[in-house]
Structures are given as C-alpha cells and as structure tokens.
Image (tube, rainbow, N blue to C red):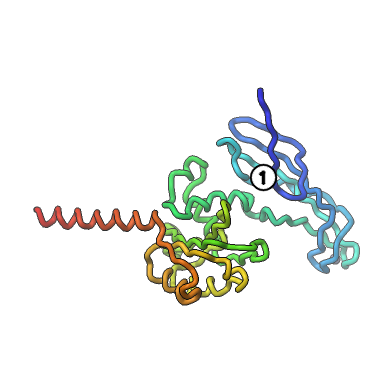
Amino acid sequence: MSIFSLPLDIPDIEIINVEHDQHQFIITVKSTLTQTQCRKCGKVMTKRHGEDKPIVLRHLPIFDQSVSLKIHPVRDQCVDCKNDPTTTQKRPWYSPRRPSTLAYEEYLLRPLINSPVTDMYHKERVGDETIEGIVDRHVDTQVNWDSFTRLECLGIDEMALKKGHQDFVVIVSAKVGEHLPILTVLKDRKKATVKAFLKSIPPALAATIESYCCDMYDGYINAAKEVFGHRVKIVIDRFHVAKHYRSGLDSLRKREMKRLK
Ligand SMILES: [Zn+2]
C-alpha cells in the first residue's frame, strides 16, 4: 500500500490517534498550548485543573470520507482570583457549542458562492437545515480584517432561507488568488445593508478591490457604485446571467403557449 501523510493545518495541536472505519476518520487531537487566559482577570494561568468532556467536531473530508476531530478541551485554574475559578481553553478554529470546525463550516458555505444550492449537501450527509443553521450563525459576524492583505474581488451571493424570519441573506466572499474566503453573511439584501458593509472595509483593503461580482439586482450594483465610484469594476457573474436568461426564456415560452392556445 502506498501511503502519504498530509498536515492537519491547525495550529498548536498534536495528533494523538487516528481511527478509520465505516468510511470515516476520527482523529483525536490534543492542544499543545499550555497557557490560557483567566476569564475573570485576564491573567495567564499556569495551573492545570483538568480536561473537559471530549467534543467531536466535523472537519474537512479527505478523499470523499468524512473526518471528525475529537478533542479534550483543557481547563486551567487561576490562582490569583478569589475562589480559584477555572477557565476552559478556547481555540480560534472551533466554537465549543458548534458541531463543526470553522473550516468545515466555510467548506459547506463555499458552494453557495456563484452557484445554486446543489446536491452537494446530500453527498456530505448534511441537510438544508444544517446549512441554514451555519448561515444563520455567520450573519453579521465581525470580519477579521487583519487576516487579509488584499481582497481583489468581492462576491455577493444571496441565499433564500426556507425557515426563519428572513427571506434572503447575502453571502459576501472575496477572491484572493485561488482562495475564496467567506467574509460575512448579511441579514438582508437591502441596499443600505450592503452599503454599510462595504463602507466598513478598512480603506487600505478597500483600495485593493479590483472587481465586485453580483447579480443584476439594483441594490447590489448601486451600493457598490455609491461606495467605490467607478474605481471598482462591477461584474454581473455568469451564473446569475444564465439564471436570468433561463427565466426570461421560460416566461417567453409560457407567454407563447398561452397565445397559441
Ligand atoms: Zn484570574
């Protein structure tokens, strides 16, 4: 058997064990970070209190097989605070109450960029509700602008939510080289909402935006024109044009059918 290894690409963890059965990998990992900040005083704690119950997080698949990471979050104790409170170590690549790593959530959201919601979710064995839950949790999240040096292309895609109170949410992504990071999800498709987001981009980063890709909806186009002026090229993307073209043909077909009857 030919074997190769690949890096897990998550900082400050060590792989303890890898199990493989029923087409899924369960990778047990351990944090190698030894210091946690106290949630009360903010000081770095040095006394290990113990480990919390393990959590299992769905992570990026490998070779069409699902992957879960099992981690025992460590809990440290503050000797400076009254009653020696304990704090569980937090890591930026997951949230304790979510079932997946942030990388996996982004992986699920990425097909929503420039494409309709596809059957991919069935293949991933997650339902529309899971996707909607993930989208919901990304609404109005603060973008960590420090992690970007350029943005190149901004993408605006809307997604209809079947459940909940909002009709449409807007997924804002960037294209930086081959990377398609999701920046945030906007709560609605109003021009004012899109415009407020575009204005929140730090000026130095906004200056690196070359194009802005959206569908033909006026609100998206005008928001960009009002914030970027003529500097940024507005691209009506292929998928959206195709969809429009199809629906145009479809209504023409229906009109013709009616007329012929
Ligand atoms: Zn403390």
The residue under the point 83% across, 62% down is 85
Q: Is residue 51 left or right of residue 183?
A: right
- x, y (%) of residue 137? 57, 60
Q: Position of residue 233 (x, y in %)?
A: 46, 66
Above or below, comparing residue 121 to residue 39 in the picture = above
Identify which amino acid the numbered label 1 is placed on: Val
Badge 1 element: strand
How many labels, in total? 1
Work out which quarter of the rendered image holds the N terminus and state it.
top right
In percent of width and height, residue 89 lies at 77, 56
Assess disc 1: are there few (<14), some (14-19) or many (≥20) residues with their C-alpha within 10 Å of its C-alpha: some
- Of residues 221 and 256, which is closer to you in this image? 221
Res 201 quadrant in image: bottom right
Side of 154 where 20 appears, left or right: right
Which residue is rendered at x = 50% and y = 55% of the image?
A: 132
Q: Quadrant of residue 174?
A: bottom right
Residue shown at 63% from the left, 30% from the top: 21
Identify which residue is drawn at 85% across, 65% down: 43
Q: Residue 58 in the image: state x and y as whole percent.
A: 62, 45
Which of the 4 quarters of the picture holds residue 255? bottom left
Residue 96 in view of the camera: no
Residue ranking furthest to the left: 261
Residue lying at the far top of the rendered structure:
1
53 or 209, nearer to the observer: 209
Name the residue that disc number 1 marks. Answer: 56
- For the question of whether residue 109 can be seen, the reply is yes
Left/right placement of residue 254 relative to residue 219 reads left
